Image (cartoon, rainbow, N blue to C red):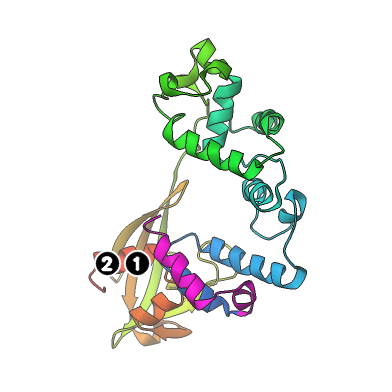
Amino acid sequence: MDQGLPYWERFLRELPTVADLAQAEPEVVKGLWSGLGYYRRADLLHRAARFVDQNGWPTGYREWLKVPGVGPYTAGALASILDGEAIPALDGNAYRVYSRWSNWMEPLNTAASKAFITEFAGGLMPTDRPGDFNQAVMDFAQSVCIPRKPRCSECPLAELCAARAAGSAADLPIKRRSARVLEEHWYFAIGYEDGRFGLVKRPEHGIWSGLYAPILLVEPLHDRTAEVVEHRLSHRKLTLYIYRVPKGFAAFSHWLSVDEWSARGMPQAFVHWMRKFAYI
């Protein structure tokens, strides 16, 4: 919260209504988002604002799912809190609580397990104050039904918990082994002249969509020394090799200072590179 609050405040100051966000230029939205990473979320937030601006506010779980970027968890949270619909909001915390409550002994990250937990949680949802119930489950997961060494002796649901009765609470939830982290090597050419960086705009799909970045190369530049930085994504470890090149090396579409680049949304990998090599 400490990290996110200043961004939230800045967003509301600059774009106080859904209509303001819907009508904003993409570069403005990404500039306000700059530093948070996951720029696809900024794109989806922008698309969601446009959807709501055009179609009005959704009501109920099924309608919320139609909004770009809104998945089952967010739709469940919004429908229960705003619309009073008795539907669970299932994120990792809630899945942990319900898997222990039901003593579900199958790997949790499968379609069958998610279907079971959705049905199980749905059967527990009260029709009165479902939003408060969902938020209580979140708080409970953070304070008592914690990931490691759950505090079963303090648990107000102990008599109802099947995992507590079976002695398996500390072993749940069961998860499939995470996917292997892929290691990739990427090569970039970046123009540099008078404190400005030569960049191009990334395609509107894939990593860093629509942001400004150096030119991606097919292979390394063997006649130049690269500045190397590592960047971690969820299942990928990227090693970036960044070569400073003269202005005439390529057709750079934009020449931006650090501040100008940041204002348009600088990918976090290049923030790391700038800090490591004292550009900022």
Q: Residue at image x 27%, y 66%? A: 275
Residue lying at the far top of the rendered structure: 166
Residue 263 in which image quadrant: bottom left
* Image mark for residue 275: 2
Question: x%, y% of residue 35?
Answer: 40, 65
In the orientation shown, which residue stands out farthest toward the front?
A: 128
Q: Residue at x 58, y 18 (%)?
A: 160
Could you classify mark 1 by the number of other residues whose Cα lies within 10 Å: few (under 14), some (14-19), or many (20 or more)?
A: some
Residue highlighted by disc 1: 271
Residue at image point 58% right, 80% down: 25
Magenta span: helix, strand or loop, mainly?
helix
Q: Which residues are magenta?
A: 1-23
The correct choice, above or below, for 204 with respect to 174 in the image is below
Residue drawn at point x = 48 percent, y = 84 percent: 253
Q: Is residue 279 something that shows in the picture?
A: yes
Answer whether residue 216 is visible to the viewer in this image.
no
The image position of residue 216, as x and y in percent, is: 46, 69
